[in-house]
């Protein structure tokens, strides 16, 4: 019995169709790379996210990157601004203020004029729409002090110091809706103290006693 084999007509791959599939594969690769990039910054890594956004936009205008660069330049070049460090990190732009420059030892009352030199910095921050966390940080030396019926600890001291800075920012015109007070006590040291002693330990503790302003 004679069998007839059905042959389907083949469609030749033209240069046009080949170019289409190559372009499509390039697009899929780019989408995969973009997806991986978005996943990599999905852990609220604001510093990385802003850098990626700046790279995609081709500029840093109106980003945390631009704000960080501008504040860092002011701290470096302008006279009268000292005792503050600026940097951009995982959470946003952070300004670290030395506690000794703002408060007397064990006090949460701002020294007279302690933040006056920072007014140009605050003026720039006030023009943005970012939220602002004011964080109080203490060293690891235990504090247990009675104040009337209340017990003062590193937790309460760090919170009250952050509160004092927030009240000053409100006096400068910052709306309360943009501000948040956080007291961390000694739970987030800037400088690890493990293995340190004497002068090195004293320097580390001095750096850990600070107020931070986090712009995010």
Image (cartoon, rainbow, N blue to C red):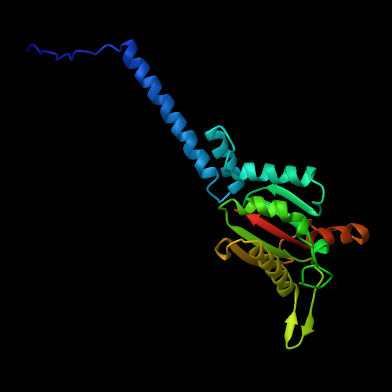
Q: Quadrant of the N terminus?
A: top left
Please state if 89 lies on the left or on the right of 32 as rendered.
right
Which residue does the image show at 84% across and 69% down from the upper left?
104
- Total numbered labels: 0
Residue at the spot 73% in from the left edge and 69% down from the top edge: 161
Q: Position of residue 195 (x, y in %)?
A: 85, 58
Residue situated in front as seen by the camera: 98 or 35? 98
Quadrant of the rendered structure where residue 193 is? Answer: bottom right
> Where in the figure is residue 198, as x and y percent of width and height?
93, 61
Left or right relative to 69: residue 21:
left
Q: Is residue 196 visible?
A: no
Give x and y (percent) for residue 37. 52, 39
Decide: is 79 above or below 117. Answer: above
Residue 30 appears in view: yes
Residue 152 in the image: above or below residue 38: below
Residue 193 drawn above or below residue 69: below
Camera-side residue: 146 or 63? 63
Residue 110, x across and y down, in percent: 77, 68
Q: Extreme left residue here?
A: 1
Most extreme residue toward the bottom, as rendered? 149
Closer to us: 23 or 130: 130
Q: Which of the 4 image quadrants contains residue 6?
A: top left
């Amino acid at each position: 019995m004679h069998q007839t084999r059905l042959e389907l007509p083949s469609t030749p791959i033209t240069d046009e169709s080949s170019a289409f599939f190559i372009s499509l594969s390039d697009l899929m690769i780019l989408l995969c790379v973009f997806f991986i990039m978005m996943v990599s910054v999905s852990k609220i890594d604001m510093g990385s996210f802003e850098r990626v956004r700046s790279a995609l936009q081709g500029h840093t205008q109106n980003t945390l990157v631009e704000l960080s660069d501008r504040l860092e330049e002011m701290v470096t070049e302008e006279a009268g601004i000292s005792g503050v460090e600026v940097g951009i990190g995982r959470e946003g732009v952070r300004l670290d203020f030395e506690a000794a420059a703002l408060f007397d030892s064990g006090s949460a009352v701002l020294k007279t004029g302690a933040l006056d030199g920072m007014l140009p910095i605050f003026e720039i921050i006030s023009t943005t729409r970012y939220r602002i966390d004011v964080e109080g940080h203490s060293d690891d030396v235990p504090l247990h002090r009675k104040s009337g019926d209340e017990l003062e600890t590193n937790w309460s001291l760090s919170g009250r110091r952050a509160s004092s800075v927030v009240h000053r920012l409100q006096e400068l015109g910052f709306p309360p809706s943009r501000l948040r007070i956080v007291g961390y006590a000694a739970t987030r040291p800037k400088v690890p103290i493990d293995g340190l002693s004497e002068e090195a330990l004293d320097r580390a503790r001095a750096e850990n006693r600070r107020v931070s302003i986090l712009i995010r």
